[in-house]
Amino acid sequence: MASSVADDHLLLVQAVRDYARGELLAADRDWDREERSCCERLTQFHEMGLLGLRVPESDGGLGVPMVPYAHIIRELAYASPSVAVTVSVHSMVCEAIRMFAPPDVRDAVLKQLGTADNLAAFAISEPDAGSDPASAKTRAEPVPGGWKLSGTKMWVTNGMTGRWFVVLARTGRDRGSRDFSMFLMDARQATVERRPIHGKMGIRGSETAEMVLDAVYVPEDHLLGQPGDGLKIALSALDGGRIGIAAQAAGIGEACLDLMTAYARQRQQFQRPIADFQAIQWMLADTRTELDAAQLLIERAAALKDAGRPFTREASMAKLFASEAANRIAYRAVQVHGGYGFVHEFRVEQLYRDARITTIYEGTSEIQRHVIARELLRG
Ligand SMILES: Cc1cc2nc3c(=O)[nH]c(=O)nc-3n(C[C@H](O)[C@H](O)[C@H](O)COP(=O)(O)OP(=O)(O)OC[C@H]3O[C@@H](n4cnc5c(N)ncnc54)[C@H](O)[C@@H]3O)c2cc1C
């Protein structure tokens, strides 16, 4: 583990590691098989402090800096990629509220976010708006005392159990960068309809929902930033979120490496362990090298964020590399297991499916390359 993590945070990372491997590993297999939400453990997550990782200590959270936070997400993902993304999205939203909500709302809501009944979610995507959020159709109309939001949001992680939703909605008439605003919506209203999205390839313990908003009321002071700041806030939140997804990918890769190493030592063919064959050794060597490279990219991006310095390009690089590496690694993990890797009984089969989403959400690999190139060409 990196020496850049302070001792008290190392203890926390270790505690999460023990908890994840002791409590979540087996549960995650059940969530995957039965497509059941890991949010059934929210009270436990609260007790472990996982819901307050990015909530300041003054608001009752743990105020964990980004570098140890990324280690924690990686440890969660090692045992349960579903729990890792649940916590990562919640934490990203905690941070958006901390940074952009008016002081009174910020103080009131942040204090609640570390508790089990106040899971947070991020609702940008729509049926026809994914990589291009400026094609979002959800509208916010001004009404006395606030706004009414109408439209359909798609693919919302934590969407079934969540309470606090950061929602991107159109307040202007065009597709310009100032035509969208960001709202903090309390989803406990009858005008919010949530529909679970079932049949996912992986992270089947993570909730994904479609949400229909039928004139949902949001008070005036629950606007984040200024009217017209919506896209800016969305992209700023995603910069931090991408470090979390990179860490999730790294955790999946670490689990794959441990499983394939153990299997290669124990599986005998041609009267010797398959670990004796150079072809297998090279897969292990490439995997360790890629995981260390991913970890260094993640820590660099996280350290820049902790230092308050620009980190957009570095976060995209970490996410691009770690997520693509996780998919290569999961492929190798199945390969090392041979036919056994192809059946559910062996966990690498699940990890292969779980790894797939990491190159898609919070910006596809193509979009990460676009961000990296844009930052480079900016000069
Ligand atoms: C399980 C899951 C959870 C999710 N959680 C959330 C969430 O909590 N909140 C939320 O708002 N969204 C969430 N999403 C949505 C996710 O962020 C989008 O799926 C993703 O951004 C891609 O959008 P899309 O699916 O509409 O694909 P599209 O944007 O339609 O892309 C299709 C393909 O075209 C490529 N493409 C698009 N534009 C370009 C371009 N300019 N250059 C090159 N290639 C391009 C893409 O890379 C991709 O390969 C989630 C999705 C899933 C599957």
Image (spheres, grey):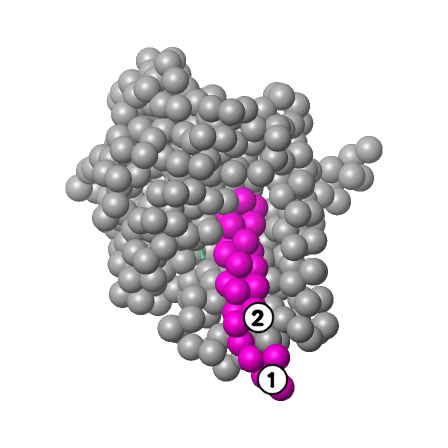
Q: Amino acid at mark 2?
A: Ala
Q: Is residue 215 visible?
A: no
Q: Nearer the viewer, residue 152 or 187?
A: 187
Q: Can residue 60 be seen here?
A: yes
Count the marks: 2
| Quadrant in which residue 139 is drawn | top left
Side of 74 where 200 appears, left or right: left
61 left or right of 78 in image: left
Query: What secondary structure is found at the residue carrying circle 2?
Result: helix
| Mark sitting earlier along the chain (1/2) | 2
Image location of residue 370, percent across then percent down: 69, 48
Name the secondary structure under disc 1. Answer: loop
Contact? badges 1 and 2 (CB < 8 Å): no
Q: Nearer the viewer, residue 261 or 368?
A: 261
Rendered location of residue 256, percent (x, y): 53, 61
Q: Nearer the viewer, mark 1 or mark 2?
A: 1
Residue 275 drawn in magenta: no
Residue that label 2 marks: 264
Residue type of the residue flagged with mark 1: Gln
Start and end of the magenta stretch? 246-272
Give the residue drawn at x 53%, y 76%. 267
Specify the quadrant that holds the N terminus. top right
Q: Which residue is mark 1?
A: 271
Dividing the picture into quadrants, the one containing residue 46 is top left
Height in image: 326 above or below 89? below
> x, y (%) of residue 145?
27, 20
In the displayed orientation, state which residue is furthest to the front: 271
